[in-house]
Image (cartoon, grey):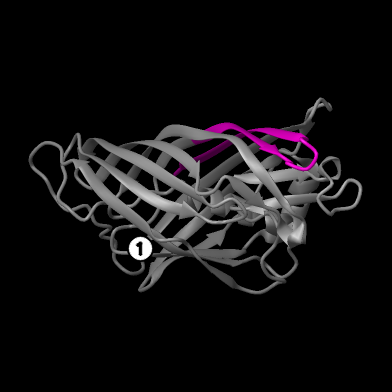
Amino acid sequence: MVLAVGLSAFGVGCGNGAEARNDNESTEPLGLGKEVTVPISAVIATVVEPGAEPRDMLRPGYAVGTSQQVTLRTEHSIQQQINDEPTRDFSTPALTIPMTAQTGPDGVDLTLGVVTSPDPDLAKALTAADGSHAGFEMSELGAITALRLEPSPDTSNGARAALEQAFYQAVYRSIAFPDQPVGEGAVWTVHQEVTGGVALDQVTTATLTKRDGNRLTIELEVTQTPKSKVWTLPNNAGTLDIEDYVMQGSGTITVDLGLPLPVSGSITVGGHQAYRDSRSSSMLQQTINTQVSWTE
């Protein structure tokens, strides 16, 4: 999803050692100490199998003012190789983000607790982010339609970028409900475009494996396909041909229709990608793995 590309070997207009990133999931801070709201691309949910009777419409049913304590954890690894050069590690440190969710008339407000990371430098920078705010605007089908970010004023750019990336990963691993009644065993697909330098068609296949009142256990399978065979690099730096792109994954989440965020679960998406500079025949290869998990 987030591509860290050493461009000097490709001769695409950057200086020696310069790097560019595909901002499908932002890695640069979006604002400087102020609230930023980012729209999220629309989703289309389609029922494949309605499941067993009884069937009901799945709808979030929490009242305004509902509170939930939940912890989001993200991991994101990138291994990159250009031609026969040694493989480089562009992974970002894991984050553990405890938060309090409070429902409002237009969505969910999030207040962050003490964010931690195994990376000592990032962990130190994140101490200033305690008490930061974020939020989701959501549709009646549970789809996230906008992401709101408001780190504390003293949060450094590095810590802010890490938080933004974690929330983007969470947003694009969320699930929307179908607009038809379904029961246990139901299967539906959710189509969504993940925008950025490489625009992706993401298809999430959801299977409702268990329902106990408002509590749903849903198995997820995710695949991503580029919408183009070319990656247009940022800042007019040129283009790369997409030679290979395989990104897929799976996981299970538990959601409660009376609460705004998942109560548990984990989703892992990974794969490999290959890009070629047609002018020099240089090849860039990446192996990427992302995990998003929720716990109460």
The residue lying toward the viewer, choosing from 291 and 99, is: 291
Task: Pinpoint residue 65: horizontal percent, then vertical percent.
Answer: 36, 68
User: Extreme right residue here?
Assistant: 16
With 204 as the anchor, is 110 left or right in this view? right
Q: Which structural element holds mark 1?
A: loop
Which span of residues is magenta-colored? 268-296
Task: Pinpoint residue 133: horizontal percent, then vertical percent.
Answer: 57, 65
Which kind of residue does numbered mark 1 sit on? Thr
Residue 226 magenta-highlighted: no
Is residue 169 visible in the rendered image? The answer is yes
Residue at the image point whose x is 61% and y is 48% from the top: 230
State which quadrant residue 129 falls in. Answer: bottom right
User: Extreme left residue here?
Assistant: 53
With 100 as the anchor, is 205 left or right in this view? left
State which quadrant residue 34 falls in. Answer: bottom right
Task: Pinpoint residue 12: horizontal percent, then vertical percent.
Answer: 81, 50
The residue lying toward the viewer, choosing from 126 and 44, is: 44
Q: Main secondary structure of the magenta part?
A: strand
State which quadrant residue 127 falls in. Answer: bottom right
Disc 1 designates what residue? 66
Task: Pinpoint residue 121: horizontal percent, then vertical percent.
Answer: 81, 46
Residue at the image point whose x is 68% and y is 70% from the top: 31
The image quadrant where one finds the C terminus is top left
User: Extreme front residue here?
Assistant: 279
The image quadrant where one finds the N terminus is top right
Numbered-mark total: 1
